[in-house]
Image: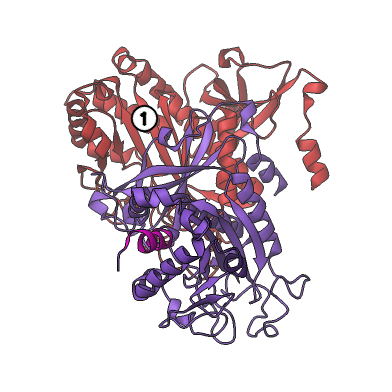
Chain colours: A red, B purple
Amino acid sequence: MSLLNDLINLDLTDSTDKIIAEYIWIGGSGMDLRSKARTLPGPVSDPSKLPKWNYDGSSTNQAPGDDSEVILYPQAIFKDPFRRGNNILVMCDAYTPAGEPIPTNKRFNAAKIFSHPDVVAEEPWYGIEQEYTLLQKDTKWPVGWPVGGFPGPQGPYYCGVGADKSFGRDIVDSHYKACLYAGVNISGINGEVMPGQWEFQVGPSVGISAGDQIWIARYILERITEIAGAVLSFDPKPIPGDWNGAGAHTNYSTKSMRNDGGFDIIKKAIEKLGLRHKEHISAYGEGNERRLTGRHETADINTFSWGVANRGASVRVGRDTEKDGKGYFEDRRPASNMDPYVVTSMIAETTIIWKP
Amino acid sequence: MSLLTDLINLNLSDCTNKIIAEYIWIGGSGMDLRSKARTLSGPVADPSKLPKWNYDGSSTGQAPGEDSEVILYPQAIFRDPFRRGNNILVMCDAYTPGGEPIPTNKRCNAAKIFSHPDVAAEEAWYGIEQEYTLLQKDVKWPIGWPLGGYPGPQGPYYCGVGVDKAYGRDIVDSHYKACLYAGINISGINGEVMPGQWEFQVGPSVGISAGDELWVARYILERITEIAGVVLSFDPKPIQGDWNGAGAHTNYSTKSMRNDGGYEVIKKAIEKLGLRHKEHIAAYGEGNERRLTGRHETADINTFLWGVANRGASIRVGRDTEKAGKGYFEDRRPASNMDPYVVTSMIAETTILWKP
């Protein structure tokens, strides 16, 4: 396969100005990523300078066959870690030919919320902890698990090292560097409590870019697992029983929370979230009821609770924040398959705009 | 997998100032290494300039779930041989949010002993000979050994060469270079008497750095065995019967021992160690009684004896030291699974501070 790699890794900058742009969008299920590539005459760094494009929405459950064109609007550019050179990844959202966002386009509404003057003034920061599980390709059983059986119980795997405790690190480490290369604000990684499960964190990102960056990071991860021959799962409870689920804890702060006196702002914000618990939960990912049981470091899905350093609560406030009297808090409810456009904008909407 | 390797080996210094820092700590069993990574804004060479961090102690047996934050204090920086560039490994120790060392934190007390003025004045040097066994992944039987059987008896394997005598050299050699790259003072390696068993030596290191360097060397070794798909064992007697155990002989000297007349100081120090034999043995590693039998180049666990060039003694003094009238001695009692913070500081405490 080395001759193929030579070709994949060709540096075209010596022979042409042309670049390749991979346009990425979210498909009809709200979780399936799609992409296709086109040639552009030269390097581009401003998304508004990129041409709109279109795709066959009838093949992604997003348009009928007799009127299948869905229009792609480029929204954010990242460096392509696979093609490198001046080649780019382009995060897009989807519209009808008439210019209306299609129903699965959650970015559009999020962008509206994030451009509301009250929200803009508060400069909302997000740090999202994306958990995921790696599965063996044909059995869909987690990597490192014996087929037809189970590994030893949870305990040794969280941040673990060693061939019997850590499964899939090459995927995780290549993803870390690929994201940094791409310009994604990836802030860390760790092995998770369930073997074969990992986490990466993106942030702090401001407003709408939190969603763009998570989606691009997810895309890069799925491209990397494709190379590695492992299947990527964002299911919130991939294995029933005494095995942790997968979440997307969302850390959040506004300018007021980060300034002196912020701890009171934080408490008021958490109160408002508590009053809209059901609405948030219904938007925090499909299948979350299998994960939010009150066990395995979660709070029960029907209960809203918060606490300092309490991993069994819906919302957790760190000890540093309590000590400094300002900082941020962590919404632990979102599932790994949440849509970051929806979750980030909803948290901003409830805490900044909504009046009980 | 070469495309994955291209990504893992990306040199990010061309496109960003950011670096990745892998924070390493010791988990709840006292022997399980844990680590996770974070992005920093630029290169760092001084551990005191690194931010403290925290981890979920309830997942490592080190904190309860409702108060789970354990704080990581960076103590020593090494270059990351896996990520290279400006990326670093950071050896940490663990504290409660209140600033107290947690019970499994043995470094804190060791650092206290090493900063005692009498100990600091004596400039304690350590050379630690870390033995370990490599096991096949799913069966936990030593590598190179036939499944369901045994290799030929010990004899050909010590420092042996050849496919029928040396098993796992690629792990050992990659570890050697990786440690040198990282900045660890690794002084040598050799194949051991039992097939599948190896040894590396770290030193001479002064005071607390002996423990830091050995722990990071162990971490690098476990990362390498993870890549190789082999399980790393520090069990002091992995195979019962006529097979050598695994130790961590600790060579030791103070300024007085290294100067003229040092041999008398050495003899006095060994006497003191003899008076505290039981206390030392209790701190020299779990399961050591299976190893210290009086056979296989060990002294019986209940006996304290020393001698020149005697590998069957608890303490061995080299012929060079005897001839020169100064030098160092070797405590052969510690097991391979000893904690170097405990052993090095206890030897210093007994020989320099303790009065019989």
Query: Residue tagged by mark 1?
Result: A344
Residue A277 drawn in magenta: no
Q: Residue at x 74, y 72 (%)?
A: B160
Depth check, front residue: A139 or A295: A295
Position of the C terminus of chain B, as image quadrant, is bottom left
Q: Is residue A45 above or below residue B74?
A: above
Depth check, front residue: A27 or A272: A272
**Picture quadrant where residue B75 is located:** top left
Depth check, front residue: A225 or B320: B320
Q: Position of residue A123 (x, y in %)?
A: 34, 19
Q: Is residue B346 above or below residue B303?
A: above
Neighbour tally class for label 1: few under 14, some 14-19, many 20 plus, Cα within 10 Å: many
**Picture quadrant where residue A349 is located:** top left
Q: Residue at x 53, y 33 (%)?
A: B19
Q: Is residue A273 visible?
A: no
Which region of the structure is painted magenta?
B342-354
Q: Position of residue B196 (x, y in %)?
A: 64, 72
Disc 1 sits on a residue from what chain?
Answer: A
Q: Amino acid at mark 1?
A: Thr
Depth check, front residue: A176 or B293: B293
Q: Main secondary structure of the magenta part?
A: helix
Residue B346 drawn in magenta: yes
Q: Is residue B322 visible?
A: yes
